[in-house]
Image (cartoon, helix red, strand yellow):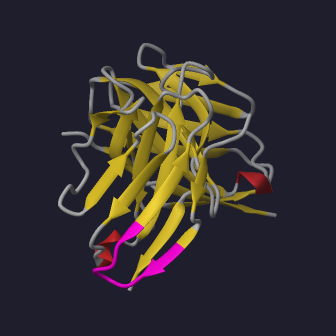
Amino acid sequence: GENVGLHLPTLSVQEGDNSIINCAYSNSASDYFIWYKQESGKGPQFIIDIRSNMDKRQGQRVTVLLNKTVKHLSLQIAATQPGDSAVYFCAEKKAAGNKLTFGGGTRVLVKP
Amino acid sequence: EAGVAQSPRYKIIEKRQSVAFWCNPISGHATLYWYQQILGQGPKLLIQFQNNGVVDDSQLPKDRFSAERLKGVDSTLKIQPAKLEDSAVYLCASSGLAGRGPYEQYFGPGTRLTVT
């Protein structure tokens, strides 16, 4: 069945360090994987996505890696800043339709 | 561009009462979604509309939840009667051809429902 989950519920990071958030998935029929950031009291905000035929994609300060062999997705945040403190969700989209299935979230706490 | 609007932002009701949430998607977005997000969990899709038609409502508890999008723009989600386990944030999202991809969903701030 569908299952998108995260290994670590909370990640504490020193300001300026790099953050790595991990996600495991089990549905091989997904064609897109997406990372969302959710700040307190707000809805999820799109960060970056990656197609299933790619293994790496870079954005501004963020990199997403996809390892289809072990069904693993990660989000790397470079030079973590206090504004990066939030809950991060991975989500997968099935090849048919726009339905997203979200994982359980990882909270990132940036220490000054 | 204006984002997805939702109201109310907070609602407290007693169990067995009814409640309704309103969503105004981003202008021009044909697809609208309602999600339920229980504290500490990721959002779970309740229903997806394409214009005013239902695309997916497989996870909507139809005995108590209903949703409509009569004119293909605004949408309302209703719960009647509410149960304690309905306490959650109800998120509305929309997507369209504009943006990074047709599947990219833009979320509203959500309505936090507390059922006592």
Q: Is residue B5 magenta?
A: no
- Residue A18 appears in view: yes
- Residue B21 pos. (x, y %): 47, 60
Residue furthest to the top in view is A53
Residue at point 55% right, 18% down?
B97
Q: Nearer the viewer, residue A44 or B87?
A: B87
Q: Is residue A57 left or right of residue B69?
A: right
From the image, which quarter does the N terminus of chain A lie in?
top left
Residue at point 48% right, 80% down?
B12
Q: Is residue B37 left or right of residue A13?
A: left
- Residue B60 pos. (x, y %): 26, 51
Choose top left, top right, bottom left or bottom right for residue B99: top right
- Residue A69 pos. (x, y %): 33, 24
Residue at point 20% right, 55% down?
B62
For residue A56, above or below residue A75: above
From the image, which quarter does the C terminus of chain A lie in?
bottom right
For residue A5, above or below residue A86: above
First to last magenta residue range: B11-19
Q: Nearer the viewer, residue B38 or A52?
A: B38
- Residue B49 pos. (x, y %): 38, 35
Q: Nearer the viewer, residue A60 or B111?
A: B111
